[in-house]
Amino acid sequence: MVPLDEVQAIQAAVDATGLDNFGDDGFREGLAMLVRSLEEEAQLTLVGRLLARAEIARILESRLRTEKIFHDHPEIEEEEIIAPVFVTGIARTGTSILHELLWRDPGNRAPITWEMMYPAAAVATSETDSALTIELAENEVRMQDHVLPAMRTMHELGAELPNECIYIFAHEFACDMFTGFFHVPSYTMWKAGLDPQPAYSYHRRFLKLLQWRQPKRRWVLKAPSHMNHLVCLLDTYPDAHVVITHRDPLRVLGSISNLMASLQWMRSDHVHYESVVESLAFGHAYLPERVMQARDAGTLATESIIDVRYQDLMADPIGTVRDIYKRCGSPLTGEAEQAIEAWMKQRPKDRHGVHEYTFEDTGLDLATERARHGKYQERFNIPSEV
């Protein structure tokens, strides 16, 4: 009833927009791998198929419309992205709250969910068109809450809230968003061996588009997936600072496993919870070890990385932000501090309910997993929470 085919998807996007220039063809391999894996492995429900097809259609139409803007306005390529700040770290370690706090500084700019979903509309001059697009994006976001009401207790989304860079990378069809939404092992393996540079080049170009015709402010960006590609990130943005958040990996493992399984459950009746846990447990041990090795080898510039412990962030959010600014070479202004404090007051913790989870839910052995993270916890003085 709802076929997933790259040729049909591309033709449908051309028909819907009246455009046929997708820009660089590098995205086509990822699209083909994704739809093949969706058909052969994801075991999608009808709702899952509808969500997948709608997501692919929106992204393809977005590529067509943004390429039209780039063609009509070549001056966009001359935009400069200066000294951005990237927030990353293992998922559920405070990356979202820190990103939001940085975003509240009027001198900073974060990519907003609706802008990344509909970038062509985001640079339109009509406020009416923008308002309609925001409403459209908000309806899409809220659809997730209707399918799984508990989702808001796990991770809040909103059309006008900042969001992860995965929404940008999705335009290249080389993105962790798909591996989180669907059980697509073939696509996941393909992506793991992919050169990330084209995706990061597209990321920079995407920011130029959103920045075009806007007041120039510092970009603050966020995605746990950046942990996989810090060398490429800093090659693409040599003047960037990368903030890495640190928290007990075992404390967050139950939470992220529950979240990822729930996202897949929204799209399939055959969720492999044990596989989700196994994959996340491996990543939680592998990624910090890989980053530590790169830092020790000098592959990553020490002066570009700022470490933040979750406990310090929660105990003193303003002080933590102030320390980050100091490392970035710019003071935290009084205006920014007031804006951050006001934001914290209107968004108390657990405002949408409590996300219940425990490490025991994973079925993993605590002593075994604790031993895997010993060096990491010792290096950054991370207290155990389970």
Image (tube, helix red, strand yellow):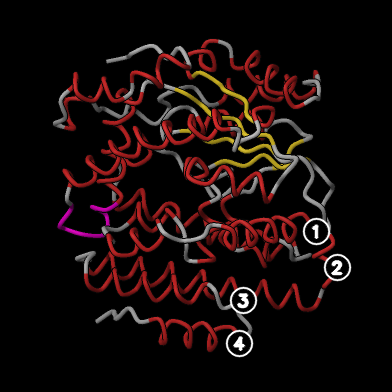
Residue occupying the point 61% across, 47% down: 233
Reading the image, the residue beneath label 2 is 75
Locate the N terminus by quadrant. bottom left
**Amino acid on which disc 4 is placed:** Asp
Quarter where residue 197 is shown: bottom right
Q: Say which residue label 4 marks.
A: 20
Q: Position of residue 367 (x, y in %)?
A: 19, 18
Left or right side of 188 for 337? right
> Neighbour class for label 2 at 10 Å: few (<14), some, many (≥20)?
few
Residue stretch in magenta: 264-271
Q: Main secondary structure of the magenta part?
A: loop
Is tag 1's residue or tag 2's residue first in the polypeptide sequence? 2
**Residue 269 part of the magenta-drawn span:** yes
Q: What element carries label 1?
A: loop
Residue 355 in magenta stretch: no
* Residue to which mark 1 is pinned: 212
The amino acid at mark 3 is Asp
Q: In the image, which disc is placed on residue 311?
A: none
| Image mark for residue 24 | 3
